Image (spheres, helix red, strand yellow):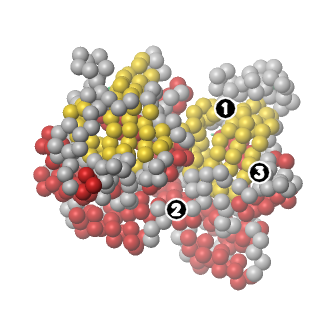
Amino acid sequence: MLLDVRNVSKIYGTSCDQCLSLTGVEHDRAICPECGSVVAVNSISLSARKNEILGIVGESGSGKSTLLQLIYQDIRASSGEIFFQGVTDKNGQPSNILHEPPSAVSRLRSKEMSMIYQNPRLGLNFLFSAGGNIAERIIGAGERRYDEIRSNALDYIRRIEMETSRIDDYPEEFSGGQQQRIQIAKALSSSPQLLLLDEPTTGLDVSVQAKILDLIKELQQDMGFSMIIVSHDLGVINHLTDITVVMKHGTLVEYGLTDQILEDPQHPYTQLLVSSIL
Amino acid sequence: MKKMKKRNMHAGPSLIRQSENRMKLDVQNIGKTFTLHNRNSVQVCGFSNVSFSVNRGEMLALTGPSGVGKSSILKAIYRTYLTNPGSILFHRTDGSVINLASCGESQVLNLRRREIGFVTQFLKVLPRITALQAVASPLVELGETEQTSSLQAAYLLDLLGIREELFHISPLTFSGGEQQRVNIARGVIAPKELLLLDEPTASLDEKSSDRVLELLMELKKKDIAMIGIFHDKGKIERVADKTYNVQREDSPVMTSSIQQEAA
Ligand SMILES: Nc1ncnc2c1ncn2[C@@H]1O[C@H](COP(=O)(O)OP(=O)(O)OP(=O)(O)O)[C@@H](O)[C@H]1O
Ligand SMILES: Nc1ncnc2c1ncn2[C@@H]1O[C@H](COP(=O)(O)OP(=O)(O)OP(=O)(O)O)[C@@H](O)[C@H]1O
Ligand SMILES: [Mg+2]
Ligand SMILES: [Mg+2]
Ligand SMILES: [Zn+2]
């Protein structure tokens, strides 16, 4: 098991002891009627193995981005446990990363896990060149040899099918689709085991979207990392993922093989979601 | 649980290995009901009381009228459809047995990569990849080199009568019959132990259909177990070792009978 998320929740607000039990899909709300807190993620459990691709779907505000941010440790969970392969305690037992020291978390974030955001400004440093952004991550993952950094950066520029001559250009000088490619190059340059993607192609031209999705798929096959991808586009989910997680009001509505979720959805909400798109 | 009679239809090599456990898949009393929650929770019967088994190197043909549940049974074995009740026991080469109706998703994914293949009725590939890539990709995914995979893909496409000039074009622009052959090549390129085939010859002319049937006969010789749906009796007689006639529960004839026919 690469990633094991157990019962993770995120509550925004003062929170009371009823928040989790009074919200979620079966209550048809994400706001706690007792204290008014927003339960963005409510007791979610999921896992990802090596090479697996998970998709997360659900309506706006259902907690998809929050869940990714919880996994990536962008934000702290209110409760729950997250285990990541290789993170162990003194006795070699899996250790909840929510209780690990900042140094361990920082290593996970700079090497083993990478995040690709919908907004390239969140994933790229716009004051650095394309090459500088990639180099920053390679250095963050522990590489100190200048020649290695440079040749790795060039290699990733090639992998995203970009002219290496553009390595010194700044993010502003690239199109939206190219910025996303640079984000991908940067994210992968630390050879992560898990790539998290939050709506990586939303807002791009359809033809550009398609090319970026192809690129992601190709790189995944080449490099063999696992992925969790958030998308409201069931077409993307269908072509890219093995397993799909359906969320509503912060809760997990349904979990299954992607073709099963799309062709034999069990939950009323999933049936509605699938039929509204087909 | 074995309701069917077993008779060995083969002479020759398969007899020699008769003493080994030849079982590949054992389907025990499975059923499927679709509940359409957003349409007044109406219940649609997919199939019910289905039991059969398939040995290595054997082809079972599912027969029965339109809408009786043949495609749904294949999807249930592949776990695209969830079933309840019943069990679908997959016998692995190492002797272990996995219930496909209830095992974990990751286990199903692993089996799909290496052991269970599905030639669906219609080709489903990304619009931007070429026919050669579409066929080669299951091998590439198993870690085979691009070059070896492409060569094998070209060999299969050629065997199925796809002209070379089409190799580098998206198969979504192909004719129905050409698409179907691409789909078959894609389904058989990676070695599998159980192959599910939903009307693999439905839109093919006589000659292409012959090529496909010959390919399937070859696969049987390689000890691959197969479950297929074919739309005509002639084809069933040529490739199938036995048939299972799917029936509606409410039909007067009792279910779970197997008629065996010599191939
Ligand atoms: N920092 C925050 N403070 C308060 N509430 C927040 C915060 N971040 C998110 N939320 C709330 O948590 C809920 C889940 O938000 P999230 O961004 O995870 O949704 P999403 O599923 O990604 O939606 P979308 O598809 O629109 O991106 C929303 O109700 C949102 O308003
Ligand atoms: N995803 C689904 N949702 C709801 N009902 C379904 C679904 N798939 C199949 N069914 C129903 O299950 C029954 C069996 O369908 P199936 O496609 O398995 O029949 P078939 O024997 O393959 O027919 P044909 O020979 O026409 O292909 C039909 O009544 C069909 O409407
Ligand atoms: Mg979001
Ligand atoms: Mg059918
Ligand atoms: Zn509360």
Where residue A34 appears, as percent x and y from the top left, is 81, 20
B263 or A133, which lies in front?
B263
Labels 2 and 1 in the same subunit? yes
Dot 3 amino acid type:
Pro
Residue identified by numbered label 1: A251
Dot 1 amino acid type:
Thr
Residue identified by numbered label 3: A94
A124 or B103, which lies in front?
B103
Q: Is residue A20 above or below residue A234?
A: above
Where residue A13 appears, as percent x and y from the top left, is 83, 32
**Mark found first going from the N terminus, 3 or 2:** 3
Please say if the residues under marks 1 and 3 sit with CB atoms less than 8 Å apart.
no
| Cβ of mark 3 under 8 A from ligand 1 | no
What SS does tag 3 mark? loop
Tell me, for residue A221, which label it has, or none.
Answer: 2
Q: Residues within 10 Å of mark 1 (few under 14, many from 20)?
A: many
Q: What is the distance, in whole Å, between disc 2 and disc 1 at their CAs? A: 31 Å
Q: Is residue B145 above or below residue B238?
A: below
Please say if the residues under marks 3 and 2 sit with CB atoms less than 8 Å apart.
no
Q: Is residue A13 above or below residue B222?
A: above
Marks 3, 2: nearer the viewer? 3
Quadrant housing residue B140 = bottom left
A46 or B196, which lies in front?
B196
**Name of the residue lying farthest toward the bottom:** A147
Q: Residue at x 72, y 25 (%)?
A: A23
**Is residue A117 shown left or right of residue B154?**
right
Q: Residue at x 47, y 61 (%)?
A: B141
Where residue A263 appears, as percent x and y from the top left, is 43, 36
Q: Residues within 10 Å of mark 2 (few under 14, many from 20)?
A: some
Labels 3 and 2 in the same subunit? yes
Circle count:
3
